[in-house]
Amino acid sequence: MSKRRSGDPPTRGDVALRPDQLVDAQKDIASLDAMTANTVVRGWVLDLAAKHADAPPRPGLRLSIDLDRLTVTLDGVTCDVRSILALRWLRVLADRPGVWVSGRELAHYDAQLDGALTSRLKKKLPECVRPLIRSESGRGSKLDLS
C-alpha cells in the first residue's frame, strides 16, 4: 500500500475523492449521528452508530458498525475494516438482516454504493464477519445473524 503524499487527493478506502465528494462524506457522517442508533432484530441489538468503542458492549449486542473509526465489532471483538465502502455495504445489509439485497438495489439504500462490486467489498471485510454474509448469483447478498 503506497503512502499518500501532500498534494494527493484525500481518499476514502481505496477510492480517491473530489472535494465535493469529501463534503458529501462529511455530511453522511453527520447524518449518522442524527440516526437512531439501535435496531432490534431477531432478539439481537445492532448498534449502527457506536460512538464509544472503548465502552463495554451492552448486553445482547451482536454487531456494531462504526463508520467514523472504520471498525466493526462482532460479539465484543473489534476489527478494523480496510474500506469505507465495504463498511457502508455491511451497514446496508445490517439494516435489513435476512433480506436479499442485489447489487442494483444498493444505490437505493446508499448512493455511494452505486456500481459497487459486492464480491470485492466482501473481501475487504474482516474474516470474522464474512461468514455472516451469504451471496448468491442473481439474488444478491444478505446478512445472517442467527
Image: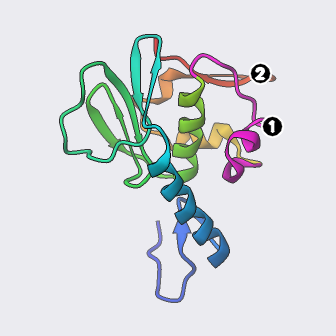
The three-letter code of the residue at mark 2 reads Arg
Q: Dot 2: within a 10 Å radius of its alpha carbon, few (fewer than 14), some, or many (20 or more) residues?
A: few
Q: Tell me which numbered mark, 2 or 1, is placed earlier along the sequence.
A: 1
Which percent across, then down, holds residue 11? 54, 69
Asked if 62 appears above or below 89 in the picture, the reply is above
Asked if 70 appears above or below 10 in the picture, the reply is above
Asked if 17 appears above or below 71 in the picture, the reply is below
The three-letter code of the residue at mark 1 reads Arg
Is residue 105 rendered magenta in the image?
yes
- Identify the coloring: rainbow
Residue sitting farthest toward the bottom: 7
User: Residue sitting at 80 percent across and 37 percent down?
Assistant: 104
Q: Nearer the viewer, residue 13 or 98?
A: 98
Residue at numbered disc 1: 104
Residue at numbered disc 2: 139
Q: Quadrant of residue 21?
A: bottom right
Q: Nearer the viewer, residue 71 or 48?
A: 48
Left or right of 84? Residue 69 is left
Question: Which region of the structure is painted magenta?
Answer: 97-114
Q: Secondary structure at mark 1?
A: loop
Callouts 2 and 1 close, C-beta under 8 Å: no
Q: Dot 1: within a 10 Å radius of its alpha carbon, few (fewer than 14), some, or many (20 or more) residues?
A: few
Is residue 101 rendered magenta in the image?
yes
Total numbered labels placed on residues in the image = 2
Which percent across, then down, holds residue 128? 39, 29
Q: Nearer the viewer, residue 29 or 124?
A: 29
